[in-house]
Structures are given as C-alpha cells and as structure tokens.
Amino acid sequence: MTTIELLIWMTKDGLDKAISATKAMPEERQSWKPLDSGRTAINQLAECLQVAEWFARIIREKNANFFTPEFFKLEHELREQISLPHVLGNIEIAYESLYAAMRDLKEEDYTFEVSLRPGLKVPLLHICYFPLRNLYYHFGQINYIQTLYGDYDSH
C-alpha cells in the first residue's frame, strides 16, 4: 500500500465515523448548539465537506491563493446555513474528488511546498493529511456533543 493509499484508507474511515456519529444523533440534537453558542454537529460535518473541497483544489492547483479572509468569512456563513441532507448528499462526492486529486499527485511533487498563509509553507504530501486530521477532530467534537445530552455510547 502506498502512502497516498494509506492516507485515503484512513480518511475514508474518519469520514465513515463522522457521518455515522452524526446520523446516530436524534434529529433535534443534530442542529443543537451546546450552550446556545457552540457549533452543531451539522456545522462540524459541513466543515469536513468544505475541507475536502478546499484541499482537493489545493492539491490539484498546487496553491492556496484562494485562502483569503473574505473566502473564510463566506465559507463560515455558508456552514451556518447548510442542512444535513445537503451535507450528506455532497460529502462523499467531495471526498471522492479529494481522493482523485491525491492519487493524481506525482511522487516528485510530494515535497512541493504550498503557502497556506504568510509564513506557513507546507509540502503537498503533508497537505494530503489535513482532511484526515480535520475529520477525526470533528468526529471527536460530534461525540463530545453527544455526551452533553447524555449519550455515552460509541457511534
């Protein structure tokens, strides 16, 4: 198994876990904001969808010029309005696009550095790991939300 295939396999596992955890929640809890100011499970899963789209684009274009404050503001606003059916209807497509971009990455480009923001240059192979890390972070956050309403089962 190549490094890319391992990352894809692990990312698929994280995606399955995040989706399953969200679907296991009662519908009224999927859009619940802890303390009326936290992030909902839907919002967290929506970010995972966006991250797949962002990083597929970065890997394909080998740049992140679109990472601007205005871009992130718009993406944040979109996450606040997105529905679970929309996320579930598009998240697998977004990740398949990410996996294709990762598979198309040539080994000689693994060390090509992309500037994600001023002062932060990251090799493309490391960038392939970002969506996986994001998925597991949000999977944990979704599980934490579940504990706040008394669900301590592992989903």
Image (cartoon, rainbow, N blue to C red):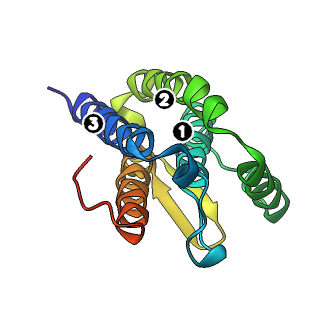
In the rendered image, the residue lying farthest to the left is 1
Residue 60 in the image, given as x and y percentages of width and height: 58, 31
The residue at 77%/48% (across/down) is: 81
For badge 1, the amino acid type reads: Ala
Pick the residue in front: 11 or 88: 88
Disc 2 is placed on an element classified as: helix
Task: Give the Cα separation between the discs numbered 1 and 2.
Answer: 6 Å
Disc 1 to disc 3: CB gap under 8 Å: no
Q: Assess disc 1: are there few (<14), some (14-19) or many (≥20) residues with their C-alpha within 10 Å of its C-alpha.
A: many
Residue 22 in the image, given as x and y percentages of width and height: 44, 44
Quarter containing the N terminus: top left
Q: Select label 3 or label 2 by which is in front.
A: 3
Task: Give the Cα separation between the discs numbered 1 and 3.
Answer: 14 Å
Disc 1 to disc 2: CB gap under 8 Å: yes
For badge 2, the amino acid type reads: Tyr
Label of residue 95 in the image: 2
Location of residue 93 (image quadrant): top right
Residue 140 in the image, given as x and y percentages of width and height: 35, 60
Find disc 3 in the rendering and name its residue. 13
The residue at 19%/29% (across/down) is: 2
* Residue 47, above or below 72: above
If you read the primary sequence from the N terminus, does the residue marked by circle 1 or circle 3 appear first? 3
Q: Assess disc 3: are there few (<14), some (14-19) or many (≥20) residues with their C-alpha within 10 Å of its C-alpha.
A: some
Label of residue 31 in the image: none
If you read the primary sequence from the N terminus, does the residue marked by circle 3 or circle 2 appear first? 3
Disc 3 to disc 2: CB gap under 8 Å: no
Disc 3 is placed on an element classified as: helix
Looking at the rendered structure, the number of numbered marks drawn on it comes to 3
Find disc 1 in the rendering and name its residue. 52
The residue at 58%/59% (across/down) is: 40
